[in-house]
Image (tube, grey):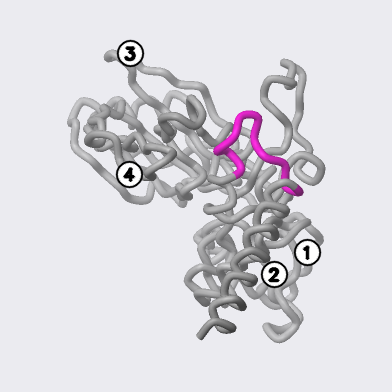
Amino acid sequence: MKIIEPTTRKKLTIDCSRKAPKHYGPDVYRFWHEPILLKARGWELIKQAREYTYMRAPAGVTLKPKYVIEVMIPTDDEAIEMAESAHREGVEWMGLVGEWPTGYVPEHQYKGLVEIDSKTHLPVGPAPIRTANPRFDMGLPLVWGIGIRWENGIRIFPGQEMAPPLCLYPDTIIEPAIYVGAVEKIEVNRYERDGTARRLCIEHYGTGCCVCAIDFGKLYGALAEGFIHVHHLVPLSTIGQEYQVDPIADLRPVCPNCHAVIHLRNPPLTIDEARELLRQHADADKAHKTKERTLF
């Protein structure tokens, strides 16, 4: 792939969610992205989890919720030239261009999600084979990025924008699961995938499930710390074109199991209904176990 060093200087704002816990020290902050840009500017990586990093500020640096840096980015023409060069070669490539992680993935096939019978919970037939279009991506989640793809040989370039999170979570699905006999489709809508809305929701409610209270970090340790799905409360049928998601009022953190159960009904269960189902069956299970102990 032809590498073109970026030529445009730009000021970018990096959001700092809050200070890290006190035991990490007074100058350690929590960020929602990869640390590469901060490390290049003297920040020290203290901890890196799945969804966030703890970084210690260089001596003399004080910041409010936002940290502004100057960085070189490519022009649209430079990005297109690199993307077309990679596309002509047709070979998967990953590396750094300037300070930005960059990659090209050619057209390829992958297995989609299988159909699941809602009664037996068993697969219905084999997983379908899907075809993914070629893609060129450059940037960092929640900071800045460019995405170029090709459909039927035609280049589609939406322009430069804030890059979405690159890490796919189970609630960030490309091919929605289909549940035969339950609802027509269960898919995570774009409001649940929106990186900024997701971050603000988790910042407000925490990473514990709002239905069953499971916290993956407490259960599995550092590897799973911060992992949680986000559920959109507002029925899509009621949303108009001017709708803007409110991360606090419209979203709730839920674990993958509770998220799936919520969507087993159409319209989906409310958070309170899901909690009540859990409580009822927990009470029934407790009564059953008590009866067994009495009998034996």
Residues marked 4 and 1 touching at CB (< 8 Å):
no
Q: Report x, y in % for residue 149.
A: 37, 25
User: Who is closer to the viewer here, 182 or 258?
Assistant: 182
Which label is found at residue 122?
Answer: 4
Label 3, on which residue? 154
Of callouts 1 and 2, which one flags the residue occurring earlier in the amino acid sequence?
A: 2
Nearer-the-camera pick, 281 or 193: 281
Q: Which mark is residue 29?
A: 2
State how far apart marks 3 and 4 are (Cα): 39 Å
Q: Nearer the viewer, mark 1 or mark 2?
A: 2
Disc 3 and disc 1 in contact, CB within 8 angstroms: no
Q: Which residues are magenta?
A: 262-272
- Secondary structure at numbered mark 4: loop
Front residue of this view, candidates 8 and 151: 151
Callout in the foreground (3, 1): 3
Which quadrant would residue 249 be assigned to in this image?
Answer: top right
As measured in the structure, the alpha-carbon distance from the residue carrying label 3 to the one carrying label 1 is 44 Å
At 76% from the left and 18% from the top, the residue drawn is 242
For this view, does 240 lie left or right of residue 33? right
- What amino acid is labelled 2 in the image? Tyr
